[in-house]
Image: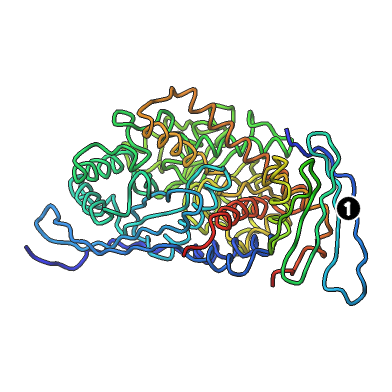
Amino acid sequence: MSPIDERLQATAAEPPTDARWTAHAVAIRVDGERRVLRLVRFPRGWLASTDTVDGPTLGHDASPYLAARRALDPLGVGLVTAMAAVAGLDRSIRRGSAR
Amino acid sequence: MTLTPERPRRVTAPRQDALASALAQFDRAADQLDLDPGLRAMLRVPKREWTVNFPVTMDDGRTEVFTGHRVQHNLARGPAKGGLRFHPSADLDEVRALAMWMTWKCALVDVPFGGAKGGVAVDPRALSPDELQRVTRRFATELQGLIGPETDIPAPDMGTNAQTMAWIMDTVSMHAGYTVPGVVTGKPVAIGGSEARSDATGLGVTITAERALAERGIAMDGARVAVQGFGNVGEAAARLIHERGGRLVAITDIGGGVANPAGLDPAALKRHLAEAGTIAGAPRTEPIDNATLLALDVDLLVLAAMEGQVTPDNADAVRATVVAEGANGPVTPDADPILAERGITTVPDILCNAGGVIVSYFEWVQNLQSFSWPADQVVDRLGQVLGRAYDEVARMRDAEGIDARLAAHVIAVGRVAEAQQIRGRYP
């Protein structure tokens, strides 16, 4: 049974028009608890983060999938589940950050 | 001792370049993942390549020189694992492709191995048993230091079998001075092989094909099935599909093919193969060629022969509902979209034929523990591992709206990339 059983919504924060980053959020459920996976895209990669009782987690990588994997790992979320969560972002947002 | 020209053993077949296929599949996954460019460059090439030319004395006293390769593609997740094939067309590029596919296959089913492959350019059917043993033992000796339970573990592949693995194990053990069962998998059970290993790849093909058929609303019981290839994988898959009620309407092997709309008996075909060297001409069958088999209107087409069998030249002719890749790379990347556009479900090779390496992993674990599991335990655990991998591929496929092959490669490349990054860079 996947710890993430529902993807609620994907949202995006509008940066200034000249910003070199965009912020996005995907709402997920981990073991029945609603959490927000925050993803920030930079020209050369991604930061991902979510909140835990010990504070926010942080993952960074050229790939949004692997950044999300690192951010969700402290919650015991597996690779495939973390990668599938990123599918909540529109594909046009995800592509091309590492090239 | 005389050195004579090599006998004409090379057989060329019209095949798509396996390495080009492997690289195209990797590039698609790397694009989908937005993989770090440095990591992408690392994973695109093998870590180690070993080529050796070695002499063997033939039965008539002549010396022949054979060429063999062993390629270790990636070791981030564990020791290298992959088959050893004896085939006239085995060359370095083919072995590179097969080693890369092994890395992804091991990662996809989440067994702690990297990927490797080996090949010797030889037609084993043209050798006597003694010649074959000498070729095997000399090649194993040339690989000394490269293969071992903690470094690189060969297994049977095209043209090799449990006996070949026994000779390798014995050669390595003689040099070590003690028995080293974990150096190879796919050994005979009498010397540390695993129960259920010989049927493992065919069973995995059957399990994943059954899942894919079910997704299309088709039960294996009563399904019309065609099988290309009647070797280690094709024979086991045909037999297990037959046991589950599938109707085998056509099967081909290297010597020809047989068809019967009412259904073929794989046990009878195996007996004919033992007598005639091919299933062609078996009683109560009609002849059929490969091109006709690939175009049959069937529920399931199992491709268990060679790479590059379904290409853009013949993909339009395929009429199966599900294509199961029992071999490595039988559908070329440029044929994939043609099958997909026509609504054909492809079970990708790194998932479909992973049963062999899963049970090889079980065998390796049993050897390291000096403990053996009963067959039902092996089969049960195989079903669990393969079922989980199938579920993960389906989940990624559905979440992203991508095809199963890309989903499988995204998971596999993602796992290897993660391991590579966590381990860091040395020095």
Q: Secondary structure at mark 1?
A: strand
With B177 as the anchor, is B25 left or right in this view? right
Residue B373 vertical placement versus B278 (above, below): above
Residue sitting nearer the eye, B333 or A16: A16
Q: Residues within 10 Å of mark 1 (few under 14, many from 20)?
A: some
Residue sitting nearer the eye, B420 or B2: B420
Q: Position of residue B314 (x, y in %)?
A: 60, 60
**Circle 1 residue:** A10
Residue sitting nearer the eye, A56 or B226: A56
Q: Residue at x 93, y 65 (%)?
A: A14
Q: What scheme was used to colour the molecule?
A: rainbow
Quadrant in the rendering for residue B414: bottom right
Q: Position of residue B89 (x, y in %)?
A: 37, 61
User: Please, which chain is the residue tagged with disc 1 on?
Assistant: A
Q: Residue at x 49, y 39 (%)?
A: B358
Query: What residue type is disc 1 on?
Result: Ala
Q: Position of residue B63 (x, y in %)?
A: 14, 61
Quadrant in the rendering for residue A18: bottom right
With B296 as the anchor, is B157 left or right in this view? left
Q: Residue at x 25, y 61 (%)?
A: B66
Residue B182 vertical placement versus B86 (above, below): above
